[in-house]
Amino acid sequence: MNAKGNFITFEGGEGSGKTTIISRLSTYFDDHSIPYMLTREPGGITIAEKIREVILDTRHTEMDARTEALLYAAARRQHLVEKVRPALDAGTLVLCDRFVDSSLAYQGYARGLGMDEVWSINQFAIDSLMPDVTFYLDIKPEVGLSRIAASQEREVNRLDMENIEFHHKVREGYHIIAAEYPERVIMINADQSPSQVMNDIVCELEKGILKDFGASLSNKSK
């Protein structure tokens, strides 16, 4: 394993299945004795979780788009310095549910603030740290939102309440990011069974990051 840990992020629109896949992947790593740390954005630590509550509260419909972008960046900064950076410096493999690409797609593109403008805010927050690999779980918004509506476990948040045009814009934003950073962003078809999505991700990891662990895992995926 390298002295510096690997930073893996997961992105996608609402209902893309990130939570399910990350849970499966963490179990998979446990089964194969691969050390890792699991976290999420916004959240992961006390201060960022409190900011998350403010951002996603369905009662906060009056929130300005720039306020939203700044709150995400603030939560990201605290999470980074308190949890992510120390773990990476210690050589830990970090799995994170969302990172800066979410802000670019949601606030930069879908909210219309401008991807360059939102990137500038986040450059200040992340201090040049970017993921080694990002898995973008791609799915049509209609399918993702129907999954949320059908799930009794998934709590509806403020972003789920946006109109369908907003969610289409989010997807367009992600596609722009994937096209701009093909060396980092791997697009996964999320309109498949969780098992197939999991297999696709493990196959990609086996080509790169998992080589550091001397693991051959693709035939053992659950």
Image (spheres, rainbow, N blue to C red):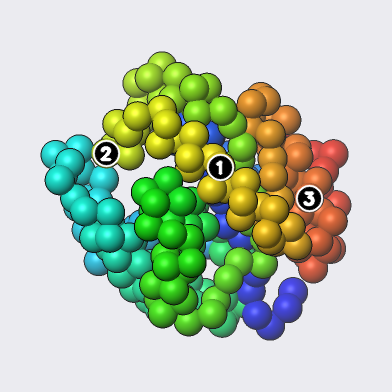
Closer to the N terminus: mark 2 or mark 1? 2
Q: Is residue 187 placed above or below 128 in the rendered structure? A: above
Q: Residue at x 57, y 64 (%)?
A: 94
Q: Nearer the viewer, residue 174 or 221?
A: 174
Give the alpha-carbon distance from disc 2 to disc 3, as whole Å.
33 Å
Give residue 172's mark.
1
| Quarter residue 74 falls in | bottom left
Q: Residue at horizontal 25%, vertical 51%?
A: 55
> Closer to the camera, 15 or 28?
15
Q: Are marks 2 and 3 in contact (CB under 8 Å)?
A: no
Q: Nearer the viewer, residue 110 or 76?
A: 110
> x, y percentage for residue 52?
27, 54
Query: To which residue does mark 3 refer?
Result: 204
Quadrant including the N terminus: bottom right
Q: Disc 2 and disc 1: Cα gap in Å? A: 20 Å
Q: According to the image, label 2 marks what residue?
A: 158
Q: Amino acid at mark 1?
A: Glu
The crowding category of the residue bearing disc 1, from other C-alpha atoms within 10 Å (few below 14, some 14 to 19, many at least 20), is some
**Amino acid tagged 2:** Arg
Rendered location of residue 73, percent (x, y): 35, 67
Amino acid type, mark 3:
Glu
As drawn, 129 above or below 203: below
Rendered location of residue 16, percent (x, y)? 53, 34
Which numbered mark, 2 or 3, is in the foreground of this view? 2
Mark seen at residue 191: none
Secondary structure state at the residue bearing disc 2: helix
As drawn, 48 above or below 172: below
For marks 1 and 3, the one nearer the N-term is 1
Q: Earlier in the sequence, mark 2 or mark 3?
A: 2
Label 3 SS? helix
